[in-house]
Image: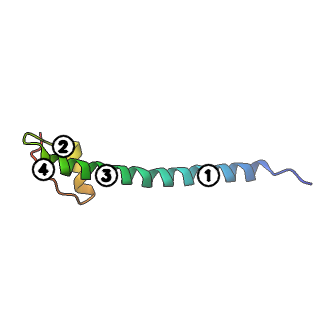
Amino acid sequence: MKKPSTGMAILAFLIGFCAFFLIMGQAVKVYEKAECERLQVYSKSFVFFYLTQAEKDQCDAHGIQIDAPVK
């Protein structure tokens, strides 16, 4: 039986590496959206609640509007 070549091992590694980052990219998007939904609830619950510019930009990117001042 022939041993797998180094090229095939590298190719398998690269495919696995790319798949890992694609899956992690989706996980980060899901986490960010959940975080924005949590901030939306907080903005309705706390009187002096505010967002940072980074939070506002993140939530705008996901299409989630939060009624709170940006500081």
Residue 24 versus residue 36: which sits nearer the camera?
A: 36
Q: Residue 59 placed where, x, y %?
A: 24, 52
- Residue 36 tag number: none
Residue 38 in view in this figure: yes
Q: Say whether marks 4 and 3 touch (CB < 8 Å).
A: no
Mark closer to the chain start, 1 or 2: 1
3D distance between C-alphas at marks 3 and 1 = 27 Å
Residue at the spot 31% in from the left edge and 52% down from the top edge: 34
Mark found first going from the N terminus, 1 or 4: 1
Marks 3,1: beta carbons within 8 A: no
Mark 4, residue position: 44
Q: CA distance from mark 4 to mark 3?
A: 16 Å
Q: Which residue is mark 1?
A: 16
Question: Considering the numbered disc 4 on the image, is that residue within a helix, a strand or a loop?
Answer: helix
Q: Residues within 10 Å of mark 2 (few under 14, many from 20)?
A: few
Task: Give the mark, 4 or 3, whose residue is nearer the N terminus.
Answer: 3
Tag 4: Cα neighbours inside 10 Å, few (<14), some, or many (≥20)? few
Q: How crowded is the residue under tag 3: few (<14 C-alpha within 10 Å), some, or many (20+)?
A: few
Q: Are marks 1 and 4 in contact (CB under 8 Å)?
A: no
Q: What is the three-letter code of the residue carrying label 4?
A: Lys
Residue 59 placement, left or right of 19 = left
Distance from label 1 to label 2 (Cα)?
A: 35 Å
Q: Amino acid at mark 3?
A: Ala
Q: Position of residue 14 (x, y in %)?
A: 62, 51
In front here: 21 or 32?
A: 32
Q: Which residue is mark 3?
A: 34
- The amino acid on which the numbered mark 2 sits, given as a three-letter code, is Gln
The numbered mark, 2 or 4, whose residue comes first in the sequence reads 4
Residue lying at the far bottom of the rendered structure: 63
Q: Amino acid at mark 1?
A: Gly
**Horizontally, is 24 left or right of 1 in the view?**
left
